[in-house]
Image (cartoon, helix red, strand yellow):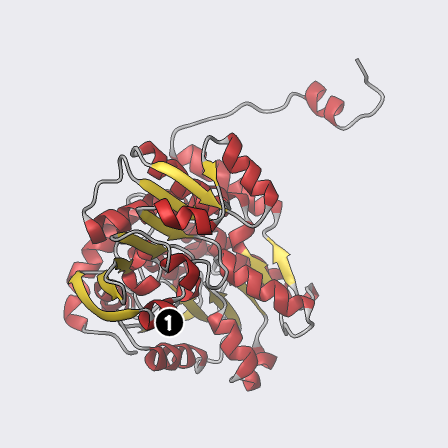
Amino acid sequence: MDIKSKDLAEEGKLRIEWAARSMPVLKSIMDRFEKEKPLAGKRMAACLHVTTETAMLMRALKAGGADVRLCASNPLSTQDDVAASLVVHDEIEVFSIHGEDRDTYYKHINSALDHKPHLTMDDGADLVGTLHSDRRELLEGIEGGTEETTTGVIRLKSMAQKGVLEYPIVAVNDANTKHFFDNRYGTGQSTIDGIIRATNRLIAGSNFVIAGYGWCGRGVARRASGMGARVIVTEVDPLPAIEAVMDGFQVMPMNEAARIGDFFCSVTGDINVIARPHFELMKDGAIVCNSGHFNVEIDIDSLEDMSKSKRWIRDSLEEYTLNDGRLVFLLGEGRLVNLAAAEGHPSSVMDMSFANQALCAEHMVKNAATLKPTVYPVPESIDKAIAALKLESMGIYIDKLTAEQEKYLNSWEMGT
């Protein structure tokens, strides 16, 4: 293991207990796993954000019989006390330190892979990418994997399309109980939380520019609007662009938005979404951040090149003085602002996302031998089961179709 300090374990344990109170679905799966041991004998390498919620997932996998190693999927998302608690109290090998540099980040990924896993669990596909580039000798022993986030699914689908993906992977991100809730409500709330923690600036009355109107962009837009911001959306796809218009937001090119924005947040999964031409147009004091998976969405190299100096003003807030004297503020080094400057998604949201991870790991163990090396959707039965468990945990019940209604829906003979 490689963590900051075991001395942080007690603090981490308390925070994991607090998260667990809002994760009843994963807890019910963990209880079943404890009895049935569906992952018995399987070695797993997990590359995820090392947070209190992830700790609950690791506990569930271990309860199911898996031998797990965990590393970070982002250098700034690790909660060091959580890593310590997993090592000390749960005897799970963790390789993760908040603020680790790029070399350490990949050293930790390789340490997790040294476990010679049967299953992988990824968030962003760096673990899978490393397997397919530098650790190919391990591929023969891999049975299957899961992927947590949009960016990772994009990368994996590209690999599958090009015929280089060597084993089956379930796109957990694409489950309705993941992206409808995690991406929309989780990213929406936690992104605003990170921005406020980093800046302590008032959202109300500001021009809040959001690049990308996928599920994450929708969530951030709703939360920013709810706090009184004038939301501006930039897009490259006409379908989400027209949806943003119909949802009541302004839509325009980034070159226009750059001139008037107070806050800028990218949530696209693409590269250089906020770049040199936009920095050249921004007004003095613009605040820029990213809530997509990697820090490539903001062209930080150009921002550095355009600046004569920079300094840290607050935790997670860096001031760039441009050559013409204007100031641009970058949050969380351009990394995921909801994890770099805050604590990530609320536990009740991650309850469903990580329930998907746990059940898809079980699904992969049962079915990997019959699956081809491509990207698969989460089975509808798993998606619906998680939704039903979540409703039950909230004390909410719904109707069931009558026999007559089922017959009608399955027939073509009955018309008006």
> Quick one: quadrant of the C terminus?
top right
Position of residue 316 in the picture relative to residue 268 (left or right): left
Residue under the image location 21 percent in, 51 percent down:
199
Residue drawn at (25%, 59%), measured in percent from left and top?
A: 326
Number of numbered discs on residues: 1
Looking at the image, residue 115 sits to the left or right of residue 405; the answer is left
From the viewer's perspective, is 140 left or right of 74? right
Q: Residue at x 23, y 66 (%)?
A: 80
The residue lying furthest to the front in this view is 324
What amino acid is at disc 1? Asp
Q: Which residue is mark 1?
A: 301
**Screen quadrant of the N terminus:** bottom left
* Dot 1 crowding, Cα within 10 Å, few <14, some 14–19, many 20+: few
Q: Secondary structure at mark 1?
A: helix
Q: Name the spot of residue 255 as percent of width and height, x first.
A: 45, 51
Q: Residue at x 18, y 47 (%)?
A: 200
Residue 259 visible to the viewer: yes
159 displayed left or right of 291? right
**Residue 349 seen in render:** no
Eyeballing the image, is 130 above or below 53? below
Given residues 384 and 39, the one toward you in this image is 384
Vertical comparison of 92 with 153: above or below: below
Q: Quadrant of residue 162?
A: bottom right
Q: Position of residue 351 (x, y in %)?
A: 39, 47
Question: Which residue sits furthest top?
Answer: 416
Where, by quadrant of the figure, is residue 221 drawn? top left
| Location of residue 100 (image quadrant) | bottom left
In this orientation, which residue lies closer to the viewer: 367 or 371?
Answer: 371
Front residue of 195/374: it is: 195
Task: Pinpoint residue 103: horizontal percent, then vertical percent.
Answer: 35, 82
Q: Position of residue 192 (x, y in %)?
A: 30, 45
